[in-house]
Image (cartoon, rainbow, N blue to C red):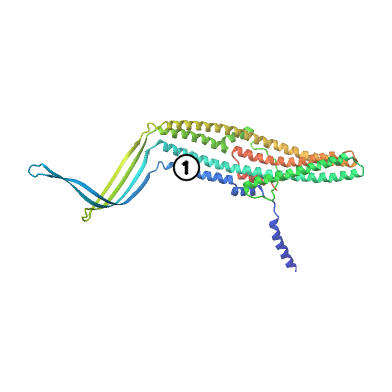
Amino acid sequence: MGNKFIKLTTALAVLIMPLVTNGASLIDIYEDALINDPRLKEAYANKQAIIESKPQALSWLLPKLTASGVFSDTDTDGNSTFQRRIFDPITGDLLAVTTDNAQFVQKTDSFQWEVTLQQSIIDAGAWMTLKKANKIVAQAEVDYLSAEQDLMVRVCNAYFDVLAAQDTLESEQAARTAIEKQLDQARKRYEVGLIAITDVQEAQAAFDQSIASEISAKRSLATTKELLREITDSYPEELQKPNTNMPLIMPNPQSENEWVNTALQQNLNLLSAQVGTEIGRNEVNIQKSGHYPTLGLQASKRDMDNNSLRSDSGSPFSPADTENISEGIGLQLNIPIYSGGQTSSRVRQAVAQHRAAKEKLERIARETTRKARDAYLGIISGIATVKALEQSVKSSTTALQATEAGYEVGTRTTVDVLDARRRLYSAQTNLAISKYDYLKNIIRLKQAAGTLSREDLTQINNWLQ
């Protein structure tokens, strides 16, 4: 009996264990996003498409071999009309002119094939296009790495926004429950004549407001969960939260300018823009090459075989077979003289695009500087905010206890208790949100510096429970 009980208990434990989880961690959400995020998949597909520009550019410098063949079967029926002149054999005078008609039938089979080899020898535009393609591929690689970092940032923002919305909803629900109890007490005290009707009305107004705030918090939570689902294509039931003893670590190095300098050297969006200016410069040279001559080698071999049968005026068919074989090799020189102004127009267009690329580089450099400074200062102020709010929660808790004690003895009103309780819930919610903002600023600073990696997510994930 004892053994059966142990086996039954073990079986139940096995069935129940999968139902008991610690919630999805930040790394769990990130793993789902790597598989399901459409934006990252789009970036990967774009990278694969752009990579093909290099072999396409290289093809203009490699030999091209083409072959073609033509077969035809022709039947011809017709009449031949010709004049015949008769001369005197002695005097040589023209005696008569006669016209003869003859019918003929001709059948012809023709087969022709040709092989042509072309090789570029001098083509400045093709070499410049290959150089540009190499940089386009390099830019695509950088853009994909930037998309991967962007995914980490989006995952963290969505993850902690859901937690913040959950904390806000829990705070509103707790406030609504407490205010409801306060309303019941106010009604009972009013019934026995201990307080005025205004206290009941104020408690009722606070309760109605708490219901509206709770509805708004539920909507906000649903929205943040939907934003997270856009990335992972699933709704996590529960997310791990930061530990109560989560460390507050200062940025290393503790120098705002050093982080800015690192960002200006390694930020992926900035590196992509730098490559973009080089691509624009290459495009200008490519369009200018439209004025340059090109030289190419061309070799070909052609074989044409005709087999025909002809019959004139019902005579037997007589065959006539011909075969022509031609081989040739030569150089082809093309010198552009005037193309209707198209080449000059394209040069001006490329110059304008290059100028736009340089302005884009300057814009991204300024944005990178701003983001690096803002994230650095966000971490510094975030640490101070968390510490201040921790103290605020303690003082708000003490203030609520004192206010409730004063309410019991009649020195404080219902409004005082409601305000004290609201301040406590607000401080608790703000404390949780300040921790999330601190963690998000860590990720943003690493992204601005171009050093964000999976290890950074793992470090933050270790601070969750």
Which residue is nearer to you in this view: 376 or 88? Answer: 88
- The residue sitting at the right extreme is 193
Q: Residue at x 75, y 67 (%)?
A: 2
- Measuring from the top left, give residue 222's x and y in whole percent: 69, 46
Q: Residue at x 32, y 49 (%)?
A: 113
- The residue sitting at the left extreme is 90
Quadrant containing the N terminus is bottom right
Is 371 left, or right, of 60 in this rendering?
right
Q: Which type of secondary structure does the marked residue at label 1 adopt?
A: helix
- Measuring from the top left, give residue 188's x and y in whole percent: 89, 45
Which residue is nearer to you in this view: 9 or 349? Answer: 349
- Measuring from the top left, give residue 259's x and y in whole percent: 62, 35
Q: Residue at x 51, y 31 (%)?
A: 355
Is 330 left, or right, of 349 in this rendering?
left
In the rendered image, which residue does mark 1 sit on? 53
Q: Quadrant of residue 430?
A: top right
* Whether residue 33 is visible: yes
Q: Amino acid at mark 1?
A: Ser
Which residue is nearer to you in this view: 439 or 403? Answer: 403
- Measuring from the top left, give residue 55's x and y in whole percent: 45, 44
